[in-house]
Image (cartoon, rainbow, N blue to C red):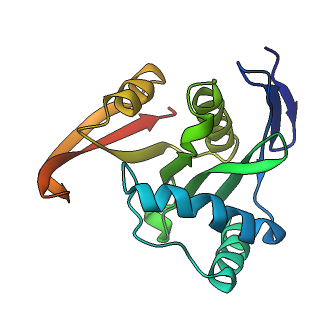
Amino acid sequence: MSLKHEPHIYSFQAKNGSEVVIRPALKQDAEHIIMAAEFIVQSREYIQKEKTRSLSEETAFIEKVENEGHLYAVVEVDGTIHGIARVLRGDLKMKRHCGVFRTWISEDVQGIGIGKKIMKYTLDWCEKEGLHKLWLTVFSSNPVAHQLYERYGFVIEGTQKDQICINGEYEDEIYMAYFFR
């Protein structure tokens, strides 16, 4: 499986033969991002979002991200958006060297190598942009994500006990970080 690099665009063939493109989100993607996110939000598993944005909110968010130098990328599988990757840099000058990472992929395209490519895409972007630290949180009940991040060099910075309550069950939120230098 080859990975073709273009400015901020990765295209590759997934393990199942699907054509995948990871590229910056465009304002015209807003409606498709919302539709894909709706299924993820409804599942309420491993996502810190309770509802999707409206079309005008999503369009404004895409524009804001672009104008402020953050990363917001879409994952297209066979021409349809099935996920996103996002890095929001610190708002304050003293925190601009750090970014918080969020990502999700539709369940129907998980397990075909896309997560690994999203990680590479994101880390490459952060390095190019001169970030010192990329951080994220992962639920303690999501060992697959936790192990993926560790494989890419993320380290645990701390754990907030009983930080999340899903279906009446408390679980921990693990803070992880990747340091570029």
Residue at the (12%, 58%) spot, across then down: 168
x and y percentages locating residue 69 in the rendered image = 68, 63
Indicate the quadrant where residue 127 lies.
top right
x and y percentages locating residue 143 in the rendered image = 31, 29
Indicate the quadrant where residue 57 lies.
bottom right
Up-down relation of residue 55 to residue 79 (above or below)? below
Front-most of 108 and 90? 108
Q: Total number of numbered labels?
A: 0
Q: Residue furthest top?
A: 1
In the picture, the quarter occupied by the N terminus is top right
Residue 70 seen? no
Up-down relation of residue 3 to residue 177 (above or below)? above
x and y percentages locating residue 104 in the rendered image = 53, 48
- In this image, 80 relative to 99: left or right? right
Front-most of 96 and 81? 81
Residue at the (64%, 31%) spot, across then down: 114
- In this image, 53 relative to 121: left or right? left
Residue at the (57%, 60%) spot, across then down: 37
Q: Residue furthest bottom?
A: 56
Residue at the (27%, 34%) spot, across then down: 156
Indicate the quadrant where residue 86 lies.
bottom right
Front-most of 57 and 44? 44
